[in-house]
Amino acid sequence: MKAFVVVMIFCCTLVVTAQAQKEKPGRSVAREELSNSYKDSIEYAKTFKQLYALIGPQKTAYIDAQEFYNRISRTFTVQGIDTAVAHKLALTGIDNNAYEKIYYSMYREHLDLPDLKKFLEFIKTPEGMKVYLALPQLQRATTETSSYVTRTVNANLAPLRQEALQKMQKERPPVLNQKLPPGMKLDSAGHPIRRAPGVHIEEVAPHSDSSSLKQK
């Protein structure tokens, strides 16, 4: 049972990967054509059809492409773009069966026929479908564990870093009576700070006070 659950999780991971792959622009589906190079291709394709009917995207590639175009074309008229020409061009070459081909290629590459059949059996159960639908959220645990470490370590080091920064600023000698590069000026403590580009501060006399610094 434990081994079967591991296989199930691996299969679900493939589905999530396939869903992510379909979002990549310009992705060719030539390699995702339903291959007949395997001895069990006919039975595999038949089993996959049953699985895809349960887990495949609800929308076709063409519908998704149409909806995506509608979102990005709202400002085309203002930009002077012919929307009729843009619409025709945007949907050129969209394969309405692209999603199924991408899924099939992913499963065919990583799962053999017995694995696919077991996965199909599990997905057909209420528990299997529940796990499958929840898997994208469950996989966030991987990201959350990494984020937890990053947040915790940075929070722990924040006071030490702040103390070191303040010490460095305090111990750093003020920059006085020297020519500063364009865009720099001195703060009240004599440390250089950024200022607007094009403003130049130069030294007039080494023994002069702050009034000896003039702006060009």
Image (cartoon, rainbow, N blue to C red):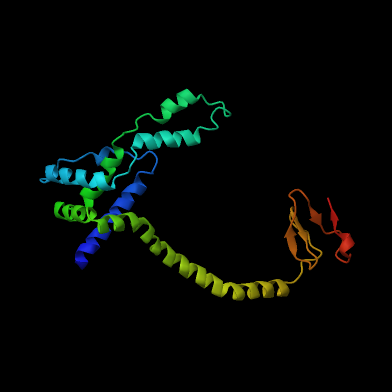
Residue 30 or residue 138, whichever sits in front: 138
Left or right: residue 140 compared with residue 115: right
Q: Quadrant of the N terminus?
A: bottom left
The answer to whether 88 is drawn above or below residue 56 in the figure is above
> Can residue 27 be seen from the camera position used here?
yes
Rendered location of residue 30, percent (x, y): 27, 37
For this rendering, which residue is in front, 189 or 38?
Answer: 38
> Total label count?
0
Q: Could you say where residue 84 lies in the image, as x and y percent from the top left?
A: 47, 23
Residue 139: tell me if it is visible.
Answer: no
Q: Residue at x 33, y 57 (%)?
A: 135
Q: Residue at x 78, y 50 (%)?
A: 199
Residue at the image point whose x is 64% and y is 72% from the top: 162
Q: Residue furthest front?
A: 126
Q: Quadrant of residue 9?
A: bottom left
Residue 60, percent from left and from top: 33, 37
Rendered image quadrant of residue 90: top left
Q: Nearer the viewer, residue 12 or 111?
A: 12
Residue 39 location (% of width, % of height): 10, 45
